[in-house]
Image (tube, rainbow, N blue to C red):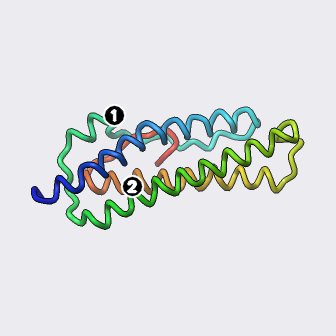
Amino acid sequence: MDELDGLANPILMQGVAFLFNEVKEILAERRKSRADRKEPDDTPIPSTGLQTVEEVLNLKPKEVRLNDINEEIKHCINMIERYRKNQRYAEAAIQQYGNIFQAPPIKRNELEDAENSIQEYAQRLKDTIEKVYGHKISIIGLL
């Protein structure tokens, strides 16, 4: 594994940083947006686990299939960014109608689909990083 550490670390570090910075922010925005729309809070209760970037990066990766892991991390990040863009477009379209309650159902569905897809890929990213390091990670909004 030592020979391959240099190849994995940049992508793993990017994935961990993205999970703890971007994903946390996105999920917080999602909770606020849903609260503003008076929708029920569907935030899962986080499990106990590592809670900071530093805690995770201080661990030595346990997973050895780096190419598969690197590709999965890149894929999850790309999909989160893509759905984040879709979410922004849906929010802008909804604002043209005044608010979420006046927007057509298709626009509300587009927003909900983007939010759910972001959460799905964020969960996959978290699961992948947990697999690599062999430890649970605690992120509010993810199981």
Amino acid type assigned to the residue bearing label 1 in the image:
Thr
Q: Is residue 125 above or below residue 67?
A: above
Q: Nearer the viewer, residue 63 or 138?
A: 63
Tell me if 119 is positioned left or right of 8 in this view: right
Tell me if 113 is positioned left or right of 98 in this view: left
Callout 2 crowding tier (Cα within 10 Å): few <14, some 14–19, many ≥20: some
Q: Are marks 2 and 1 in contact (CB under 8 Å)?
A: no
- Tell me which label, 2 or 1, sits earlier in the chain: 1
Q: Nearer the viewer, residue 2 or 51?
A: 2
Amino acid type assigned to the residue bearing label 2 in the image:
Asp
Tell me if 12 is positioned left or right of 140 in this view: left
Q: Is residue 122 above or below residue 99?
A: below
Secondary structure of the residue carrying tag 1 is: loop
Secondary structure of the residue carrying tag 2 is: helix
Q: Nearer the viewer, residue 142 or 20?
A: 20
Callout 1 crowding tier (Cα within 10 Å): few <14, some 14–19, many ≥20: some
What is the x, y in percent for residue 107? 80, 52
The residue drawn where x is 22% and y is 60% is 63
The quarter holding residue 7 reads: bottom left
What is the x, y in percent for residue 51? 35, 35
Total count of labels: 2
The residue drawn where x is 60% and y is 35% is 29
What is the x, y in percent for residue 39? 73, 40
The residue drawn where x is 73% and y is 54% is 110
Location of the N terminus (image quadrant): bottom left
Which mark, residue 68? none
What is the x, y in percent for residue 53? 32, 36
* 3D distance between C-alphas at marks 2 and 1: 16 Å
Residue that mark 1 sits on? 52
Residue that mark 2 sits on? 127
